[in-house]
């Protein structure tokens, strides 16, 4: 095994362990005199075990696909989301306590802990509910030099399903049923159809066979589609009737569609070389499927009309929503211009890790071309 995965796992596990210790220490300090020795030991042991669940579940999820592993993965993923908000609650407890100390105010530590940790629990419950509410958003996009036949037609931007242990066959059936109701003329998927874990890929993607838009379904890989089961994923996607575009360009009734896989998109020189080779014909509208909203100067220079992306999830959970905005700026979500290039980034329909969304929403985008 290469050294970097081991170091990455050790780093992530260390962060999780320290975070769980901070929660434990905060609860013990704030409930001093309220917790019996047995309750304190039980809290310590429980948080110690929980600190290792997600890393262990992820390692198992990459190797096995069975109901027991899926159940363990779901429990660990839900706890990871709750941990995020409990950690914030612990920080807020400490912050308020310090402010009260500085100002000489009365410090009621148990009340503060009950308030912030209860709020964290409520926010976690909201996140679990919110992520299953898939919004159908509609956007009208004007593409210069769009073939007359495409005016008024619709395209479904469908991204980031993360099919696997969390989003299983029922989720796959649900999103394809929603897609069928929208009756788009074409479906465009810029990556992360799969979560990257071990799964029965053919079964999970089988519901997509029921979709038959007049101008087809096109897909380019995201980072999770390129994990260990990449060949299995690609075979299942192709068997479901979805056309994978790997540094390829197709012309669909006069509209050019280009797909670049995620791995290649991480190298500017590869993106530049691919787009120079597949250069969109001047005077014709073109769409690029590029998983992440990146390499925009290169894409614009190549003359692409519209880039469709996902990947960001909008950060999915606070405070990661804030960090994601710092990384991708306005291109984190929605339709924006980069010079002559238009970029639409979707939050995606699924989730990675915690099946929660706080500060973002699950969505599918129905685009009407003008």
Image (tube, rainbow, N blue to C red):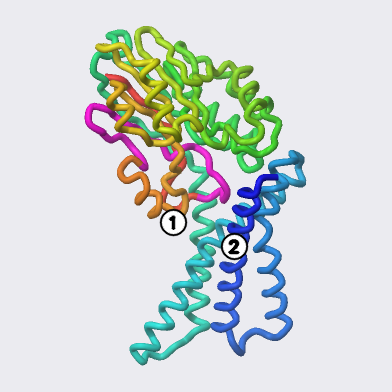
What is the number of the mark on residue 261?
A: none
Q: Secondary structure at mark 1?
A: loop
Q: Is residue 336 magenta?
A: yes
The residue lying at 68 percent from left, 74 percent from top is: 44
Please state which of the two labelled residues, at mark 1 or mark 2, is closer to the viewer.
2
- Residue 183 visible in the displayed image: no
370 shown above or below 81: above
Q: Position of residue 54 (x, y in %)?
A: 65, 54
* Residue highlighted by disc 1: 318
Tell me if residue 303 comes above or below residue 131 in the rendering.
above
Residue at image x 27%, y 28%? 341
Image quadrant assignment for residue 10? bottom right
Q: Secondary structure at mark 2?
A: helix
Q: Nearer the viewer, residue 297 or 174?
A: 297
Could you say which is closer to the camera, residue 220 or residue 162?
A: 220
> In which image quadrant can residue 193 be found?
top right
What residue span does the magenta drawing correspond to?
332-356
Q: Earlier in the sequence, mark 1 or mark 2?
A: 2
Residue carrying label 2: 16
Position of the N terminus by quadrant:
top right
| Residue 183 spot, x, y in % from top left | 45, 19
In the image, taking residue 283 as reference, residue 36 lies left or right, namely: right
In x, y percent, where is residue 153?
35, 16
**Residue 96 colored in magenta in the image:** no
Alpha-carbon distance for marks 1 and 2? 17 Å
């Amino acid at each position: 095994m290469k050294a970097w995965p081991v170091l990455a796992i050790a780093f992530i596990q260390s962060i999780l362990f320290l975070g769980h210790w901070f929660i434990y220490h905060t609860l013990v300090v704030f409930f001093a005199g309220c917790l019996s020795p047995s309750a304190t030991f039980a809290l310590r042991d429980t948080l110690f075990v929980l600190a290792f669940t997600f890393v262990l579940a992820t390692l198992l999820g990459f190797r096995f696909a069975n109901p027991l592993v899926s159940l363990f993965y779901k429990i660990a993923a839900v706890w990871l989301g709750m941990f995020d908000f409990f950690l914030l609650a612990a920080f807020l407890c400490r912050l308020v306590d310090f402010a009260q100390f500085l100002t000489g105010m009365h410090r009621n530590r148990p009340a503060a802990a009950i308030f912030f940790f209860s709020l964290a629990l409520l926010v976690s419950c909201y996140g679990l509910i919110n992520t299953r509410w898939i919004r159908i958003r509609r956007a009208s996009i004007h593409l210069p030099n769009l073939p007359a036949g495409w005016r008024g037609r619709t395209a479904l931007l469908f991204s980031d399903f993360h099919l696997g242990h969390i989003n299983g066959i029922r989720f796959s059936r649900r999103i394809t049923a929603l897609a069928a109701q929208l009756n788009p003329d074409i479906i465009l998927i810029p990556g992360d159809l799969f979560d990257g874990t071990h799964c029965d890929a053919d079964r999970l993607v089988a519901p997509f066979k029921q979709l038959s838009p007049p101008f087809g379904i096109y897909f380019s890989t995201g980072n999770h589609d390129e994990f260990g089961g990449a060949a299995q994923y690609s075979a299942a996607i192709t068997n479901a009737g979805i056309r994978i575009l790997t540094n390829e360009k197709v012309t669909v009734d006069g509209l050019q569609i280009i797909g670049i896989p995620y791995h290649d998109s991480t190298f500017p020189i590869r993106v530049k070389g691919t787009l120079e080779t597949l250069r969109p014909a001047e005077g014709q509208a073109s769409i690029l499927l590029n998983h992440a909203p990146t390499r925009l100067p290169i894409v614009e220079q190549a003359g692409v009309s519209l880039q469709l992306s996902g990947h960001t999830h909008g950060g999915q959970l606070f405070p990661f929503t804030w960090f994601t905005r710092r990384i991708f700026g306005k291109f984190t979500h929605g339709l924006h211009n980069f010079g002559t290039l238009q970029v639409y980034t979707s939050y995606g329909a699924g989730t990675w890790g915690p099946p929660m969304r706080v500060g973002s929403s699950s969505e599918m985008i129905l685009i009407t071309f003008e």
